[in-house]
Amino acid sequence: NAGVTQTPKFRVLKTGQSMTLLCAQDMNHEYMYWYRQDPGMGLRLIHYSVGEGTTAKGEVPDGYNVSRLKKQNFLLGLESAAPSQTSVYFCASSYQGISGANVLTFGAGSRLTVL
Amino acid sequence: AQRVTQPEKLLSVFKGAPVELKCNYSYSGSPELFWYVQYSRQRLQLLLRHISRESIKGFTADLNKGETSFHLKKPFAQEEDSAMYYCALRNNAGNMLTFGGGTRLMVKP
């Protein structure tokens, strides 16, 4: 049982390049999330999805786009990468909304560097 | 807007000493709080949640609504407790968690 899988694990981009991070979960979870982790700032929510075909903005959505065409996949796209987007990106999922027993399952993270 | 504050970025203690990782929150609704932990080279994972009133790996956390705090405590720290700890607050709709900035705990031998 793989849980939450993120690809790629590492990537170096030049300013202006585009890329897509893929998150896949095999737990039949409805909710999926993309966070970025920066030193001293904890995890900040970029975008999230409460089901296939739906997405919503989180705390820091600017410069990112997402898609949830299939229930098991949640893609995070950077159309024109900027150095400020250098970060570690975490995908997470939950069965339903976060409450009680429904907690987040995290992926291993994707380290992105934008030069 | 909801907010979670962890005032200490780094907490260093000796093995066997008591540990308290501070977490304060601001929220207008009924709060539901969690502690997540990230050990070196491992994924972020749930440590405990306030509604369960449980003790996990010797850690406990009590929600104090008057002081809007949810501090994480352990009476005797172990070296294997060294990790990054995040306090998190759920919103009313249950569709997102707001995380604090994190506290790195280092337990020295």
Image (cartoon, rainbow, N blue to C red):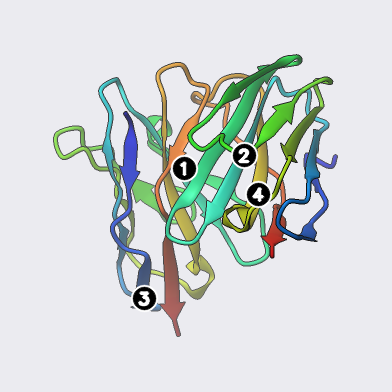
| Of pointers 4 and 2, the one earlier in the residue sequence | 2
Along the viewing direction, whichever of A87 and A3 lies nearer the viewer: A87
Q: Measured from the top left, where is residue A91 in percent x and y?
A: 68, 41
> Which element carries disc 3, helix, strand or loop?
strand
**What subunit carries mark 4?**
A
Q: Nearer the viewer, mark 4 or mark 2?
A: 2
Mark 3 to mark 4 CA distance (whole Å): 27 Å
In the displayed structure, B38 sits above or below B67; it is below
Contact (CB < 8 A) between labels 1 and 4? no
Left or right: B68 in relation to B37: left
Q: Mark 2 belongs to which amino acid?
A: Gly
> Residue A24's x, y, as percent?
81, 35
Q: Residue at x 36, y 75 (%)?
A: B12
Tell me the quarter of the picture where residue B13 sits. bottom left
* Mark 3 vs mark 4: in front: 4
Give the percent coordinates (x, y) of residue B26. 26, 34
Q: Nearer the viewer, mark 1 or mark 3?
A: 3
Residue located beneath label 1 in the image:
B48
Whether residue B99 is situated above or below residue A100 in the rendered picture? below
Q: Quadrant of residue B77?
A: bottom left
Q: What distance separates the C-alpha of mark 1 from that of mark 4?
A: 23 Å
Residue at 33% in and 31% down = B2
Kindly identify the amino acid type of the residue bearing the numbered disc 4. Answer: Tyr
State yes or no: discs 1 and 3 in contact (Cβ < 8 Å): no
Q: In what element is the residue under mark 2?
A: loop
Q: Which mark is residue B12?
A: 3
> Circle 4 is placed at which residue position?
A89
- Mark 4 → mark 2, Cα distance in angstroms: 14 Å
| Residue B50 appears left or right of A9 | left
